[in-house]
Amino acid sequence: MTYKFDTQCVHLGTHPDPETGALATPIYQTSTFAFRNADEGARRFQGEEDGYIYTRLGNPNHTAVEIKVAGLEGAEAGAAAASGMGAISAVLWTALKGGDHVLAGNSLYGCTYSLISHHFPHYGIESTFMDLTDLDAVRRAMKPNTKMIYCESPSNPTMAIADLEGLARIAHEGGAILVVDNTYCSPVVQRPIEFGADVVLHSATKYLNGHGDVIAGVAVGKRDFIEKLKMEGLKDMTGATLSPFDAYLLLRGMKTLHIRVPRHCETAMKVAQFLEKRPEVEHVWYPGLESFPQRELAAKQMKYFGAMIAIELKGGYEAGKRLINSTKLWTLAVSLGDAESLVQHPASMTHSALSDDELAAAGISKGLVRMSVGLEDPDDLIADLKQALEAQAVAGIRA
């Protein structure tokens, strides 16, 4: 029987322990697994028999996470990793080799951008960063050696929406794959595989876990690619093994994913509408606003409009700095998707590895502020922003 999404969040990948009846999946805190005999060990190493060998190669806690995330995303299989960058690196190293070319969005998480732009050239992998919202330009940018289109939608931190169906079509026509980082959304909001994506990535640290106490990553896609990813990108190249305890916490967090994320999104809409009306605010980027230029595409691809907001204050960088220094309920911290609302400055924090020219090319101004809307009462969040905006406005006048 196929259960609905909410039920899958609770039950998929988990079951009472057959030995003890424990309802919560036990923590298999072990580095290695014993074989019944030499022949069994040999069969497992040859891939002739399912079973566990060594936690870097797999663990029951990993399996439960992988089944759940793959099922929620509508994928065939999943691979758990020690961090979002562990999953991203493993996917890229598995899919690409020297001489290949990757097309990537010009607005990406800073470490992803650094990996592709600063490090891949040392290994003969070419890259082109561009505005992936222009499908005609993407089609023209494809090369005979293009093996991947890599995107975030919405992008971090500019909130640009990519036409996933269009990108998948272009990628497949050119013999490439489409890889989508779905961290900003979670499968509650968006399921890229339904639009043709081949691989979907998550920093599971964020919405999937939801409680700010885990570092983890997950990649899902077709079974053949995921098995290759586990044996190459994770086992041999990165060794980015998720700890059993973190996998346990991640499983616990995902049981309430379907409850948490809609609340995040509902509150974010109220916060964005408030900010858009403030005289101190130059611009608000949030897919749910009528003023958002890609709202129609966002509505097509996303069940909700997410809980990430980007804003630009009229006073630029100094005004943004005063704002984040003046909040009391909003916490100045990187990351996103936590129960707590977070605010940060990408140009000096999450995207600080980018040069001024790279920031400009990505559309990230020095004054852009990124906001992750949490689970507090929306009236309290708005009241805190109101006092912070008023405080920074007064400071600006005095300065």
Image (cartoon, grey):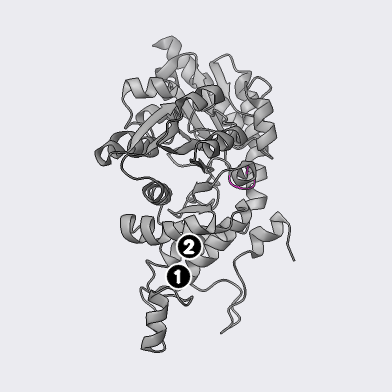
Residue that sits furthest to the left in the current view: 122
Viewer-proximal residue among 241 and 376: 241
The quadrant where residue 303 appears:
top right
Q: What element carries label 2?
A: helix
Which sits in the foreground, 154 or 41? 41
Which residue lies at the image location 63% right of the left edge and 53% below the top edge?
Answer: 74
Q: In which quarter of the image is the C terminus?
A: top left
Q: Nearer the viewer, residue 222 or 262?
A: 222
Boundaries of the magenta span: 186-190
Could you tell me if residue 366 is visible in this image?
no
**Would you say residue 187 sits in the magenta stretch?**
yes
Q: Which amino acid does label 1 sit on?
A: Asn
Q: In which quarter of the image is the N terminus?
A: bottom right
Secondary structure mostly seen in the magenta stretch: loop
- Residue at 50% over, 58% down: 224
Question: Which residue corresponds to mark 2?
Answer: 247
Residue drawn at x 40%, y 18% is 318
Secondary structure at badge 1 equals: loop
- Check contact, mark 2 vs mark 1: CB within 8 A: yes
Is residue 284 left or right of 121 when viewed as pictured? right
Q: How far apart are marks 2 and 1 (CA)?
A: 10 Å
For the residue pair 115 and 350, the one nearer the viewer reads as: 115
What's under tag 2, amino acid-wise? Answer: Ala
User: Who's the residue at 61% across and 37% down the image?
Assistant: 306
Horizontally, is 122 left or right of 132 in the view? left
**Residue 33 place in picture, x, y as percent:** 39, 79
Q: Which tag is nearer the camera, tag 2 or tag 1?
A: 1
The residue singled out by tag 1 in the image is 59
